[in-house]
Amino acid sequence: MATLPAHDMGAAANAFRKDAREWLAKHWTAEKRAAHARKPFKERGWDTEFSRLMGRDGWIGIGWPKQFGGQGRSASEQIAFITELANSGAPGQAHGTGESIVAHALFSHGSKEQQDEWLSAIRRGERSFALGYSEPEAGSDLASLRTRAVRDGDDWIVNGQKLWSTGGDKAEYVWLAVRTDPDAKKHAGISVLIADLHSSGVTIRPSLALYGKTFSATFYDDVRVPAKNMVGKVNDGWKVITDALAAERVMISATRMAGIERAFDHFTEYLKTAIVDGKALRNDPLIRDRIGALAADIEVARQFQIRNARLVEQGRVPIHEAAIGKVFTSELQERLGQAALDILGTGGLLSEDAPGAPVGEMEQVLRHSIMGMIGGGTNEIQRNVIALRGLDLPR
Amino acid sequence: MSIQGTAERLSDFDRNLLRRSVRELLSRCWPAGDAVERASNAPAIAALWQDMASQGLASLASNTGETGLRESVLVFEELGRAACPAPLLGAVAANLALAGQSTNATRAVLDDVHQGKAAIALALGAFDGDKAAGRVEAHGNELTGRASFVEGVQAATHILVFTDTPARAAVVTSGASGLSTQETPGLAVPAFAELTFASTPAALVEVSPNVLADIALVARLACLARALGAAQRAFDLAVDHAKVRKQFGQFIGQFQAVQHKLVNGLITLDGTRLALESAAEARDGGDPEWRVFAQAALAFAGPALRDVSIQTHRALGAIGYAEEHEAPRHFRRVHADLARFGGTPRARAELADFLLGPVQ
């Protein structure tokens, strides 16, 4: 494999990485890989059966505190595991949102009953979530969301529309941001509900996103959500949302970084032996210069990831540091995809199932990069955050 | 011979103390208001060097010391921040090349360096990496050849020259017969010099080519650290400026165009520092892959820090364009240091060699 040398993440992370690799080798078998590869691209990555297997053997919630049934693994160990999971190609999306976002909100804001009900099921790989945040008039300005929830007895009645929910057509539940006080200032009147996507009144309309998988618009028409499914206090949802996302940006970036490194490794492995028009691509000085530049960028992206992990391990929540990692990593993915087109030429446009495609996955890497620059808050919004929190510039 | 020290290293806390101590020393002995004028003043540099030596900084990276590359890059960063041309590059290279196997003559020079009595300029010759840097050969105890782009010659008492045929580290006194020096002014301040050796007597020690190449890589990282310190200082001034300068009735730091420009600078500066420190830590820890991490830091920082420097000036506007402002000296330093030793193209080529194998 033509790859940059690995950084030593410490003895514990190295040992845990070995355990993870061995477990994946045993359970993400060649047969399963082949079956997974035969699926349409948009179906890959989401496998509830494999999530349950991971849950059975304790691979979900490894970083959760022990009092919530987790293993209290360090950020370095979690990154080691995420990297191994990505390198193996095993699917982890079905439980990912529940494990990384919903659970962390429940630790801080969930009632004892909610923690008992949801956390163990998430850890077993038996609950899948989509996020219900964005709306037609609430993208970067999320706090202007309008989807209403009105209390009616033991239920909240929800009316409104959500957009761009990844996994919305596959998940069982939605982590739903709603407005419960239309008269309060916009950040103050928001609450969070866990809603069953199979409830009466829910309409789900998936769209195929540029990267090859679906995201969904979801419509809520008088949807009844049990009041016990409100997480945090009523009208206190903005804090629930932001707390849940803060530390988890680190893990989300780690997942993306693992994917970028994997694609880069495949790309350079191809370039080592490829002959085009009788000439070895590896000898082309322009290609070598471009690959050297990308390798340097990947090393820097790794450094941002390591810094974030260390901050988390020190008990700090990286805010602008996490935003820096997100901005740099997603824009690096875009550069990698563009470089592949320049180097591979028209062949770089071919997808992995096209006969004779060189590498094959690079055009998808490019399409996917857009998601990284938009999802979880656009890079422009991230830069605003860095300006205020990292440089203390005036509003 | 290994250039990797084995002594117990400083803690992060101690390194922060070291940074504060160096910054305080330089603010006292090399104040920003006089820095440019003093840069061409050899006696002023010699006096500063004595002050630095008295704090043990001339012994950085000694095999027997407790300081490694992490501490060295930290001090170079501070030199860049202060626009200070202290002859540390030659001292670090001499400490790495000459310690442990030096002759009486070279041992005496090293002692003088550690006491601040001697200042060494470094000529890497064939190990420089810049194709136009020249080459010096050793014949017996004499040197012949040319070395270009050598810094710090004006204040140097000695020149440390690397030769490749055969591989040697040679120490030449500045007034040696057959040595001629020509200043080559340009973007770098103080100016580089071109040295010509014609049967010039030298004290030579045998050093393996691999060790000389590793020392040259350390020199590249040192210059990167110096460029980082310079870029960071000018950037800090630009950020401060954006918080107080008003145009169109508001602070320019409130404009998103300015904010995002500065944010991009912060990302680059943070990325460079993390990659540089990681490479230094890998070397100090004995990781043989430190060279790859070093090449990555160099390949990233070349274009990235230069852009920070440019964008810093755009944020400062005409206020930062006058030579009496600190920004121009840092602009010069950033560009000069990052263009040396083969610059970005060389570092990228080295990474390509690692990933794709050498060109066949």
Image (cartoon, coloured by chain):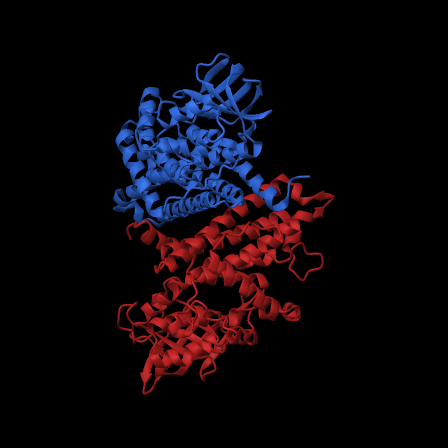
Chain colours: A red, B blue
Above or below A271: residue A159 = below
**Residue furthest out toward the bottom:** A153
Q: Nearer the viewer, residue A76 or A344?
A: A76
Name the image quarter holding residue B139: top right
- In the image, is residue A73 above or below residue B56? below
Is A315 positioned to the left or the right of B289 in the image?
Answer: left
Name the spot of residue B91 as percent of width and height, x first.
42, 29
Q: For the view shown, which residue lies furthest in the top direction?
A: B177
* Left or right position of A297 against A244: right
Q: Nearer the viewer, residue B65 or B253?
A: B65
Total marks in image: 0
- Quadrant position of residue B199: top right
Q: Give the percent coordinates (x, y) of residue B47.
A: 31, 24
Give the residue displayed 46% in from the left and 56% down from the top. Answer: A10
Q: Is residue A380 visible?
A: no
Residue B197 in picture, x, y percent from top left: 52, 16
Above or below, A270 against B294 in this view is below
Q: Quadrant of residue B38?
A: top left
In front of the other: B108 or A223? B108
Counting from the top left corner in percent of width and height, residue B46 is at: 34, 23
Using the rendered image of the protein, determine whether residue A206 is visible from the camera's viewpoint: yes
- Front residue (pair B209, A84): B209
Question: Which residue is depicted at the point 51% across and 32% down?
Answer: B341
